[in-house]
Image (spheres, grey):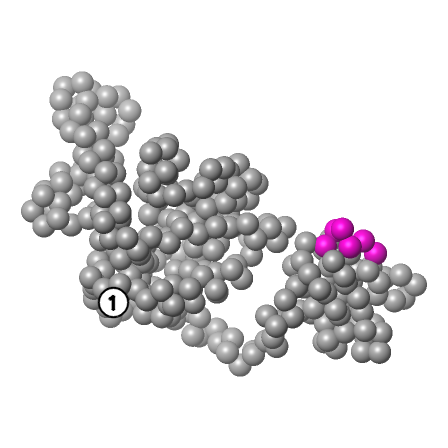
Amino acid sequence: MRIEKREEKCSECMLCVRDCVMGVWRNVGGKSRVVDLDLCNCCSHCIAVCPCDAIIHDGLKKEEITPVNRKNLNPDVYRDIITSRRSIRQFKNEPVPREIIEKILDVSRYAPTASNSQDIGYIIMTDKHLIEKTAGGIFGLASRLFNKTKNRTGRLLLDLTGLSQNRYLKVMSYVQEQNAQTGRDFILHNAPVLILIHAPKNKPFACDDCNIAAGTIINYAHTLGLGTCFLGLLTLVLRWRGKIRRELHVPRGRRVYAALAMGYPAYQFTNTVSRKKPEVDWV
């Protein structure tokens, strides 16, 4: 890897030095200098911060680096994106074009990762049969476990563990009824697209990295007219059920830290929603 500075362009503003957290760039005798190439994690900050286009870095793709258009950075628009986005659990029976999904993934790769590791992976499922099979398998398992709570031993266990008032257990009878009568999928929501976001198993901050990427996806997808929903139950099941991991082609040595259903919403939300004030301690 080669990192150089065009001396004729450099203004010695030292922004590359000030912003390089790894200490690749340092102040040497009043001049910005590359001191240790091996420390570079290719975060691109030195090029992004340089106002003079004075840095050459052959570890990065020059064609992907473009000027920031600050006219597009509208805080009111972004607020509307955040406050109008909903978790969608009813989708149209309509496929999402592959080019749209690729457009979303192209944006999600800009989500930050710890130490700029960029080792997030995606599994994109559009096979309707496989999605339905996965949902049916998980729902069947949940139903069997719930049915065991109806006998005397099960009720006693719920009372002893304090789970008798768990809202998910309390709604399960209704869920079973709706599934039997209408075929409604309460697990993956009959979504046309399922996105599994994975990273190396037991890697520090892997969960954070995947969920930051997921957050990027849900907000950008919303701007494209798509709806999404986090599937926490699926990530939990994938942690313990090797058979389902294999069926969904999760690579060995990787763990799915976030899962999303995605598709075109069956209906639109007219208004934003109410949210409680955050709990904040100022220190």
**39 part of magenta stretch:** yes
Q: Is residue 277 left or right of residue 46?
A: left
Q: Which residues are magenta?
A: 35-40
Q: Can you give x and y, in whole percent of width and height, for residue 30 in the image?
A: 90, 66
Residue indicated by mark 1:
269
Q: Is residue 35 left or right of residue 222?
A: right
Q: Is residue 164 visible?
A: no
> Could you tell me which residue is drawn at 60 percent across and 75 percent down?
66
Residue 20 or residue 269, whichever sits in front: 20
- Which element type, helix, strand or loop, lies under badge 1? loop
Q: Nearer the viewer, residue 155 or 275?
A: 155
Q: Where is 37 relative to 65, above or below?
A: above
Q: Nearer the viewer, residue 152 or 72?
A: 72
Q: Residue at x 18, y 41 (%)?
A: 171
The residue under the point 27% across, 27% down is: 162
Specify whether residue 99 is painted magenta. Answer: no
Mark 1 surroundings: few (<14), some (14-19) or many (≥20) residues within 10 A: few
Q: Residue 134 location in percent, x, y? A: 26, 43
Residue 236 percent across, percent down from the top left: 36, 38
Q: Quadrant of residue 2?
A: bottom right
What residue type is disc 1 on?
Answer: Phe
Q: Position of residue 228 (x, y in %)?
A: 32, 58
Specify the farthest residue to the bottom. 71
- Residue placed farthest to the left in the image? 181
| Residue 64 in sight here | yes
